[in-house]
Image (spheres, helix red, strand yellow):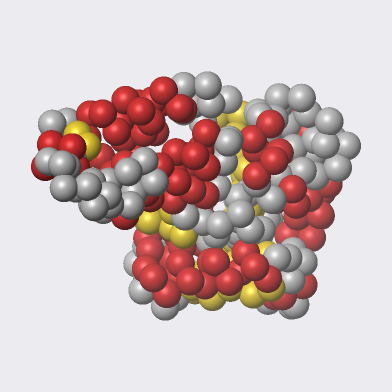
């Protein structure tokens, strides 16, 4: 039968009942091990078991009495639970995270995409007609989440993503290939360096914006996610200063800049955009009612 490490015993006394482990029992074991680390241990245990079995979470929930005979699957599940119990985020354990309904590969080389970052995509789409050609730049692209979402929604657009990390760009390129998106390309380099004198109709970014000493950052975030994708100096504004200061040289007349930032940084980011010459500067809140994104238009359109 399957032992705790997933290997089969040759004991002739083993019965089918001994070989199988019910889904509900596996979930209960996972809950017990994840209770200390997870806000919703049942939800996470179900996700981890579903991935190990190659099933959906809905299937797991609908078949609590199903008996699992696959020792390799139970091994995978126990390995998943062990990693998660040590604090590793579920997205890294499974190597995948959904963003804008797109399944994205994620590794410890890239920031885990957050739901609130979808606001950047929503704002960008509000400025880019879907039936016209456009050029879009995503700075600090990471896994490619923003760039890929925009490329999917804007098939006539050319989307460029840049990131200082070659490892992150490799992940983004794999995601583009996996999703079959040919209108997006990724380049390695610091901020605007990879696009030289090119201009764009819209620049979007979820840059690092956390202050080094911010004590609100969860320990697991500091431990597992890439430091350079999270932290930006003493006040968290170093990257945003670079972006707002240089964006105008890479925007077409009337083009837009949309940046994500911390929930307490709205006033400072509005000031940065205004000082750089942007007009129509506005901060938008996320679903939690917190300041999350600020946008501004580069002068040049009628009425600017």
- The reply to whether residue 40 is in sight is no
| Relative image position of residue 113 (x, y in whole percent) | 52, 47
Residue sitting at 69 percent across and 31 percent down? 219
x 38%, y 25%: residue: 31
As drawn, which residue projects farthest toward the right? Answer: 234
Q: Position of residue 188 (x, y in %)?
A: 69, 73
Above or below — where is 261 with respect to 7? above
Q: x%, y% of residue 249?
A: 76, 66
Q: Position of residue 168 (x, y in %)?
A: 62, 64
Closest to the observer: 194 or 171?
171
Q: Which residue is drawn at 41% across and 23% down?
A: 32
Residue 212, located in which quarter of the rendered image? top right
Q: Nearer the viewer, residue 146 or 172?
A: 172
The part of the image, by quadrant, that contains residue 268 is top right
Whether residue 9 sits left or right of residue 182 in the image: it is: left
> Taking 139 as reference, is 30 above or below it?
above
Residue 45 appears in the picture as rendered: yes
Residue at 45%, 27% in the rendered image: 33
Q: Which of 221/232 is in front?
A: 221
């Amino acid at each position: 039968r399957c032992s705790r490490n997933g290997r089969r015993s040759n004991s002739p006394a083993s019965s089918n009942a001994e070989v199988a482990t019910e889904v509900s029992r596996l979930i209960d074991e996972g809950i017990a091990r994840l209770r200390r680390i997870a806000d919703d241990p049942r939800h996470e245990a179900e996700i981890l078991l579903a991935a190990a079995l190659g099933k959906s979470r809905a299937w797991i929930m609908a078949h609590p009495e199903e008996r699992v005979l696959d020792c390799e699957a139970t091994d995978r599940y126990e390995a998943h639970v062990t990693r998660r119990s040590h604090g590793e985020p579920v997205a890294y354990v499974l190597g995948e995270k959904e963003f804008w309904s797109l399944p994205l590969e994620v590794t410890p080389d890239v920031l885990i995409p957050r739901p609130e970052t979808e606001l950047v995509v929503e704002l960008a789409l509000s400025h880019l007609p879907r039936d016209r050609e456009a050029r879009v730049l995503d700075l600090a692209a990471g896994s490619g989440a923003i760039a890929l979402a925009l490329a999917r929604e804007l098939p006539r657009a050319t989307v460029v993503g840049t990131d200082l990390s070659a490892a992150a760009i490799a992940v983004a390129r794999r995601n583009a290939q996996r999703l079959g998106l040919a209108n997006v390309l990724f380049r390695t380099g610091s901020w605007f360096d990879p696009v030289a004198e090119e201009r764009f109709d819209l620049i979007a970014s979820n840059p690092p914006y956390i202050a080094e000493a911010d004590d609100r950052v969860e320990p697991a975030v500091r431990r597992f996610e890439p430091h350079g994708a999270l932290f930006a100096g003493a006040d968290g504004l170093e990257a945003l200063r670079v972006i707002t200061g240089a964006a105008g040289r890479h925007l077409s007349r009337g083009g837009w800049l949309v940046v994500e930032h911390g929930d307490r940084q709205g006033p400072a980011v509005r000031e940065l955009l205004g000082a750089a010459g942007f007009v129509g500067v506005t901060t938008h809140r996320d679903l939690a009612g917190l300041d999350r994104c600020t946008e501004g238009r580069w002068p040049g359109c009628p009425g600017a």
